[in-house]
Image (cartoon, helix red, strand yellow):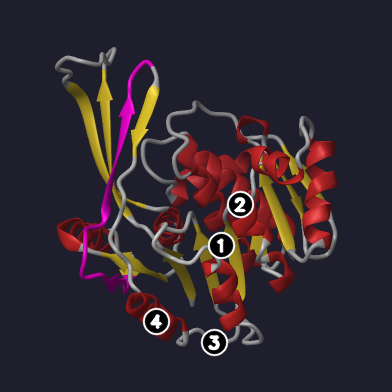
């Protein structure tokens, strides 16, 4: 079974406004409402690709109820810990001449809620996959990813981590199955300017030396690079298409890689699947569907 964890799920309200102006009344021309959060995005895309999975994390209030309802509607199994105080956040994404985001705070997660999540993680068994994605709410320990990997150590669970900077670096000694920084995040981690795929490969190999099994680096419109568990290097340009929405593209790449790996057991095929899945989401108002991914995969045959 595949599990995802989203520590701070959201309702993503996406509003399009022609020529937005501050200080006055603006009217939307289009509105979209999605369950959000990086792990949730991974869950939705995996389901779209035909892979059953269970979304874990924390929800609260009426917004938490709506997140769960929307996931149920999409056929995504979920078992969130219900938090007593506060409400799941609403993230507003305004699309106009410029894109603007306002992200909510989220609920007041307590230690008893974290303890309940650990009891849920005890269900995982050898061969299962766990995807840990996104930021850690300020009310939780900054070591949460590392703590979970320490807790699950030695159980034969493959863990994918999509996080930034210290969150990511601290899990490397636990040998995550997959990490997915982008080229800008690699630059921040190592304090260097990364411009080319050669640069990406060099620093992806450093991440592998520090413990990661598969290092998948997204480069937006410039494609992606993978240094895999067999120390093989893979590079590809991005598929052709029109960018509509960058939100969730990286999460979709993680979901695509996992789906491709489980289908084939081949890192090269998983890499192509991840790249095309991420691109399919970028080329759509919503997250990638199986049909959209298959259409892009044809570019690499």
Vertical side of 121 occupied by 296: above or below? above
Residue behind mark 2: 273
Residue behind mark 3: 125
Compare marks 1 and 4 and give the one earlier in the sequence: 4
User: Can the viewer see residue 294?
Assistant: no
The quarter of the image holding the C terminus is: top right
Vertical side of 125 occupied by 12: above or below? above
From the top left corner, tell me how far across and down residue 165 is, in percent: 63, 51
Residue behind mark 1: 259
**Distance of mark 4 from mark 3, alpha carbons?**
19 Å
Q: How many marks?
A: 4
Q: Is there CB contact under 8 Å for labels 2 and 3?
A: no
Q: Is there CB contact under 8 Å for labels 2 and 1?
A: yes
Q: Is there CB contact under 8 Å for labels 4 and 3?
A: no
Residue behind mark 4: 115
Which-is-in-front pick, marks 1 and 4?
4
Compare marks 2 and 1 and give the one earlier in the sequence: 1
Highlighted magenta segment, given as a residue range = 78-97
Q: Is there CB contact under 8 Å for labels 1 and 3?
A: no
Which-is-in-front pick, marks 4 and 2?
4
- The stretch drawn in magenta includes residue 88: yes
Q: Residue at x 16, y 20 (%)?
A: 27
**Distance of mark 2 from mark 1, alpha carbons?**
8 Å
Closer to the camera in the image, 145 or 244: 145
User: Can the viewer see residue 40?
Assistant: yes
Which-is-in-front pick, marks 2 and 3?
3
């Amino acid at each position: 079974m595949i599990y995802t964890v989203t520590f701070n799920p959201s309702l993503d309200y996406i509003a399009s406004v022609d020529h937005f102006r501050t200080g006055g009344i603006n009217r939307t021309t289009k509105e979209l409402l999605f369950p959000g959060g990086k792990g949730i995005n991974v869950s939705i895309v995996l389901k779209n690709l035909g892979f059953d999975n269970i979304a874990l994390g924390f929800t609260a209030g009426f917004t938490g109820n709506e997140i769960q309802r929307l996931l149920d509607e999409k056929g995504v199994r979920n078992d969130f810990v219900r938090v007593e105080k506060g409400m799941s956040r609403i993230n507003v994404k305004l699309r106009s001449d410029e894109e603007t985001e306002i992200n909510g705070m989220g609920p007041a997660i307590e230690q008893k809620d974290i303890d309940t999540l650990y009891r849920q993680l005890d269900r995982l068994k050898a061969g299962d996959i766990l995807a840990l994605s996104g930021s850690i709410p300020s009310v939780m320990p900054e070591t949460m990813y590392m703590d979970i990997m320490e807790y699950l150590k030695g159980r034969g669970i493959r863990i994918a981590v999509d996080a930034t900077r210290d969150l990511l670096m601290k899990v490397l000694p636990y040998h995550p199955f997959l990490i997915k920084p982008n080229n800008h995040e690699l630059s921040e981690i190592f304090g260097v300017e990364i411009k080319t795929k050669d640069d990406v490969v060099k620093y992806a190999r450093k991440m592998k030396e520090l413990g990661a099994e598969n290092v998948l680096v997204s480069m937006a419109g410039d494609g992606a690079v993978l240094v895999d568990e067999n120390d093989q290097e893979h590079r590809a340009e991005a598929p052709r298409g029109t960018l509509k929405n960058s939100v969730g593209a990286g999460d979709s790449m993680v979901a695509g890689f996992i789906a491709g790996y489980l289908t084939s057991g081949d890192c090269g095929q998983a890499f192509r699947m991840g790249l095309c899945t991420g691109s399919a989401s970028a080329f759509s108002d919503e997250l990638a569907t199986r049909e959209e991914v298959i259409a892009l995969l044809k570019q690499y045959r």
